[in-house]
């Protein structure tokens, strides 16, 4: 992902190399090229507008003297603005003062929530935590078993409704899981919730009800970076319907253009906290805006 965007931006910025002073017209022309590259990569229009306006203003006002030549100065500005739209600093999980910390996952079906639950659990075990996975996706037939499988791989237990007890009420499972976590001294609870293929009211209501019951410290909105422009509208729907405190980008190993996923932070105001780039539990990392910007700018 981001290869085309990366190639385009790198070549636009390379065109400036070896130039002396940059006139306002040079900066405008460069900004136009960057604008096209961002739009072609699916970055949301309002995000592109702000980005370009900031780059132009800063590039035109930049001091010519100093250690950097004009081209390097523009590269630096573009890099800083990119880090800015990606959220600036890395945002860590906020942990509850009194355990357990509750992390709820929300997102469309197929976005990678269940896989992510395993990845996050493994990551947290590596940091010395004792997470409990909670199966509140009782709609998709294999979701509970799938969560139990990733849990086993991550070496953590899964709290799920007992087999034979019918489908079960996800809100009730969520409520009981917190009691179980306290009883068995799990310091973190990761609640997997149901998603649908598209945004729908009932799913939103159920997620909102679970949120109400577990009072999570973090609600992570999990979004498949491969869905392109829909990533932004889906994020807005979840922000309004459930609310979230952070974003997880999944399937960054895919070949989509990726710009929409890069817009989610700026559009929703919530930080991208983790990124997934494969199906294995290890294909996961904390999201670092500066590293992502460097990767994109080559
Ligand atoms: P859920 O419906 O939101 O719980 O989504 P799942 O966790 O079941 O994931 C849906 C599909 O996407 C599964 O086949 C996963 O193996 C796959 N998947 C999840 N995360 C990634 C990722 O980062 N990269 C790739 N390539 N596939 C992923």
Image: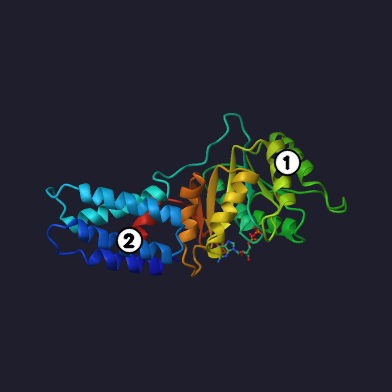
Label 2 near label 1: C-beta < 8 Å? Answer: no
Label at residue 219? none
**Image x and y of residue 254, in percent:** 51, 68
Position of the N terminus by quadrant: bottom left
Q: Which residue in the structure is indicated by mark 1?
A: 209
| Front position in the image: 94 or 245 | 245
In the rendered image, the vertical position of residue 21 relative to residue 219, given as above or below: below
Q: Residue at x 17, y 56 (%)?
A: 70
Q: Which residue in the structure is indicated by mark 2?
A: 297
In the rendered image, the vertical position of residue 6 relative to residue 176, given as above or below: below
**Image x and y of residue 225, in percent:** 53, 61
Q: Using residue 101 as the reference point, say whether residue 266 is left or right of it.
A: left
| Front position in the image: 95 or 129 | 95
Corner quadrant of residue 185: top right
Could you tell me which secondary element the residue under label 1 belongs to? helix
Could you tell me which secondary element the residue under label 2 belongs to? helix
Local crowd size for mark 1, using a 10 Å CA cut-off: few (<14), some (14–19), many (≥20): some
The mark that comes first in sequence, 1 or 2, is 1
**Image x and y of residue 25, in percent:** 21, 60
Query: How many numbered dots are placed on residues in this image?
Result: 2
């Amino acid at each position: 992902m981001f290869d085309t965007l990366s190639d385009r931006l790198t070549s636009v910025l390379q065109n400036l190399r070896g130039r002396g002073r940059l006139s306002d017209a040079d900066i405008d022309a460069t900004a136009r090229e960057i604008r096209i590259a961002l739009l072609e990569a699916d970055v949301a229009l309002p995000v592109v507008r702000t980005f370009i306006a900031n780059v132009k203003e800063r590039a035109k006002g930049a001091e010519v003297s100093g250690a950097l030549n004009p081209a390097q100065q523009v590269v630096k500005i573009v890099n800083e603005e990119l880090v800015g739209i990606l959220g600036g600093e890395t945002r860590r999980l906020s942990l509850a003062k009194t355990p357990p910390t509750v992390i709820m996952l929300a997102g469309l079906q197929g976005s990678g929530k269940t896989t992510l639950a395993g990845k996050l659990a493994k990551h947290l075990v590596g940091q010395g935590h004792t997470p409990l996975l909670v199966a509140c996706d009782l709609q998709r037939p294999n979701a509970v078993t799938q969560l139990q499988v990733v849990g086993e791989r991550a070496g953590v237990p899964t709290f799920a409704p007992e087999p034979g007890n019918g489908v079960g009420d996800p809100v009730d499972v969520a409520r009981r899981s917190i009691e179980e976590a306290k009883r068995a001294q799990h310091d973190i609870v990761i609640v997997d919730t149901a998603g649908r293929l598209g945004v729908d009211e009932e799913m939103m209501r159920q997620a909102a009800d679970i949120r109400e019951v577990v009072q999570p410290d973090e609600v992570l909105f999990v979004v498949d970076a491969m869905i392109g422009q829909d990533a932004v509208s889906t994020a807005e729907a979840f922000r309004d319907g459930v609310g979230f405190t952070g974003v997880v980008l999944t399937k960054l190993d895919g070949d989509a253009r990726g710009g929409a996923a890069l817009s989610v932070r700026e559009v929703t105001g919530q930080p991208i906290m983790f990124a997934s780039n494969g199906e294995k539990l290890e294909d996961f990392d904390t999201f670092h805006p500066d590293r992502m910007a460097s990767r994109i700018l080559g």
